Amino acid sequence: MWYPENRHVLNETLNKYLKTGKHKKPLALDKNSKLKKGQNPLHGIIVPHAGYQYSGAVAGTAFSLIKKPVKKAIVIGPSHYVHLFDAMTTNQQDIQTPLGKTKTFNTDFLTGNIEQEHSISNQYPFLQKLHVEQIMPLMIGKITNQQALEIAKKISKIKALYVFSTDLSHFLDYETAVKKDKESVKIIENLDSEKFRFIDACGYFPLLILKELCKIKKTKPELVEYKNSGDVIGDKTSVVGYASFYF
């Protein structure tokens, strides 16, 4: 299991992770919200999706930025188990975790059984903790730049919190991973089209959609926190990188 199966333990775990985020700038949910002095608009976040004991705290730093009620969220993650060349959402009316059920919604995307995709399902408890009313999970396969643009245009019309799911480099030694991940973080923050193909991340194809969505929303991602599994468990011989952003 990627997170605690016991409702009480999961709830307490999420409480702990959601207290880890302390960002210097207060954020409003979207550009249509009434911004107070010093606030930035918040369209969405980028979070990792490993087991909670590894990356849950890093994910929590981004989820903790969401202070206003969210009616809808779109969770966009890579396909790890299904060969896919498109975007697919769930064919289920609800998603369920130990915290309960949450309704899903669809805006005419291809449907299928995507329940085993952990890059998406690992975000559900965080969203339930934030009392999100409806979720559209979107599993992304090997898409083209044109497909990424079309998907970005489609979801940009939906008033929702966008949650992009990706880990960074996998199974490098600690020093190499940190160097590689710093390069990826810089490319993501700058939306550098020329260097985007050099990003080392399992969520590369969702990030193609992110790049186009940020252009539409006229915003850029900003790093909240970076760590890797070596920082968490101490074994630095072979690590996985985790980063959280908001945009």
Image (spheres, grey):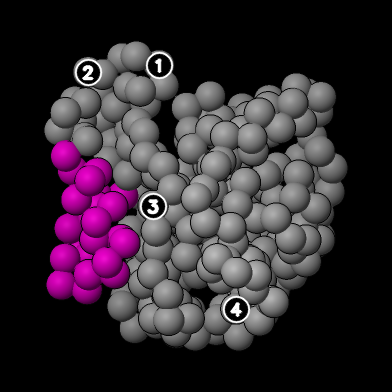
Q: Residues within 10 Å of mark 3 (few under 14, many from 20)?
A: some
User: Please, is residue 215 above or below residue 117 in the view?
Assistant: below
In percent of the image, x 49 and y 37: which residue is there?
A: 58
Q: Is residue 122 magenta?
A: no
Q: Nearer the viewer, residue 239 or 40?
A: 40
- Looking at the figure, which quarter contains the N terminus? top right
Residue 34 sits in quarter: bottom right
Determine if residue 169 is in view.
yes
Q: Which badge, 3 or 4, is on the more N-terminal residue?
A: 4
- Inter-mark Cα distance, 1 to 2: 11 Å
- Inter-mark Cα distance, 2 to 4: 43 Å
The residue stretch that appears in magenta: 179-201
Amino acid on which the number 3 mark rests in the picture = Leu
Determine if residue 114 is in view.
no
Where does label 1 land, which residue? 233
Where does label 2 land, which residue? 237
Q: Nearer the viewer, mark 1 or mark 3?
A: 3
Amino acid on which the number 2 mark rests in the picture = Thr
Q: Nearer the viewer, residue 227 or 201?
A: 227
Q: Residues within 10 Å of mark 1 (few under 14, many from 20)?
A: few
Q: Nearer the viewer, residue 230 or 154?
A: 230
Q: Which badge, 3 or 2, is on the more N-terminal residue?
A: 3
Q: Nearer the viewer, mark 1 or mark 4?
A: 4
In percent of the image, x 34 and y 31: which residue is there?
A: 228
Where does label 4 land, which residue? 31
Q: Main secondary structure of the magenta part?
A: helix
Badge 4 element: loop
Q: Nearer the viewer, residue 236 or 186?
A: 186
Where does residue 202 sit, x and y in percent of width and height? 35, 49
Where does residue 47 sit, x and y in percent of width and height? 49, 48
Q: Nearer the viewer, mark 3 or mark 2?
A: 3
